[in-house]
Image: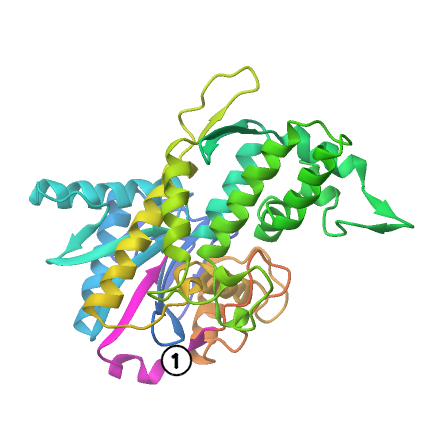
Amino acid sequence: MAIKPHFEYSSKKDMIVGFVDNGKKRVKRIADHALVFMIRGITKNYKQPISYTFCCTATEKHELAQAIKDHIRKLKSSGFHVIATVCDQGSSNMSAINALIAETKHRNTHSTRYVFEVDGDEVIPLYDPPHLIKNIRNNLMTKNLTCSIDNENKTAKWEHIVKLYEENPAYKGIRLMPKLTELHVDPKKMPKMKVKYATQLLSSSVAVNMGYLAEKGILDPSSKETADVILFFDELFDSVNGGFMNEKKRPGKDLLGPLTPKSSHQSVWTKSKEVLKTMKFVTPQGHRKSHVSTVPNWLRTLENLEYLKDLLFQKHEIKSIWLRHFNQDPLENFFGCVRSHGARSNNPTCVHFEVAFAALLINNLNSLHSPGYNCEKDQGRGFNCLSFSYITGVRTRINY
């Protein structure tokens, strides 16, 4: 979370707060970000922030990798069983995960999975699906996306989405796609950090209208390829985004239900992996952009979700899983609570962050959701900080 660079003397600590501080040592650099670790239950609906540090821009990968291992060890000593980690695609996050995996493969040359081990316990790294879908949208604005769906080559182009918006299909002033606005298609006005604008754009309603208008000759016929790609991502995101708030099934949205041994999630993931393996971003001139990490991260996340599913269903005998427990919404909501603590403070200092963190911890995260921020309600309940040390035998995963 970005914070305001600022120095302030703390009489309680008898020190100046505002430098980079990882809890073990302080460095003579000005802190402008806070790194937070949070745990979230898999079978029990709880969440709890457990630590924070101050860094400059980002935490160095080896330091972050060590912090991940330290947190897992301390949680294990408290009776928790850490099964997975969740993070976004920050460069330091990806580098730390890759370093942990490389370290594990160095010790165990027979390991072929995208996982790492801490003191012999396997941990499954996942990337936050809302961030993944948002990055697909961000890359699509400047590059074309090619792939093979049902053995047919498809090319999705941003210009097709712009043309659909400009066509503005309506009858007597009532638009067919009222949620498609300039905030979705104009890069200069788009709130790029908010996930909802990406999911509303890469949705079935946009795809169906685009495909229909292309078939009728109102839009370029090649727009059907973009519509097919959008439908693919709508189904893919639904398959990893089921939560308690989706218990009332929406027509055609069965994937928003829980993951069970008989649900259709596995078949969707199997198909999606084949499509993702053929997917690449290219420039309008046809040059491949090899540095885009979002597509391989989607593929790794699906493969690890499959492995996680088998592990929980077979080894731990769990009957169903809500996949929204494996995203960063609780952490985003916590950051929203920090920014709104006391008076509105979108850019808190280190001292303000510490005060808000402590107050929210004691008040048990009294707000489940922060309106206006880039996530949905996570429905997770914080457990009382006084009982934190006494909860044992609980399966969890870490957000950071």
Q: Residues within 10 Å of mark 1 (few under 14, many from 20)?
A: some
Quarter of the rendering containing residue 298: top left
**What range is drawn magenta here?**
380-400
Location of residue 136 in the rendering, given as x and y in whole percent from the top left corner: 51, 39
Q: Is residue 360 visible?
A: yes
Q: Which colour scheme appears in the figure?
A: rainbow
Question: Between residues 349 and 91, which one lies in front from this camera angle?
Answer: 91
**Foreground residue, 118 or 310?**
310
Q: Is residue 53 above or below residue 145?
A: below
- Is 394 colored magenta in this rendering? yes
- In the rendering, at what x and y percent does residue 76 appear? 19, 69
Measured as percent of width and height from the top left, residue 169 is found at 81, 42
Task: Classify residue 122 by image quadrant.
Answer: bottom left
Residue carrying label 1: 383
* Magenta-colored stretch includes residue 304: no
Rendering coords of residue 73 (x, y %): 18, 64
> What type is the residue that disc 1 sits on?
Phe
Residue 12, quarter of the rendered image? bottom left
- Residue at (65% x, 31% y) in the render: 223
The foreground one among 35 and 128 is 128
Q: Residue furthest right?
A: 172
Direction from residue 6 to residue 267 in the image, left or right: left
Residue at the image point whose x is 38% and y is 71% from the top: 48
Residue 5 visible in this rendered orientation of the protein? no
* Point 84% across, 46% down: residue: 170
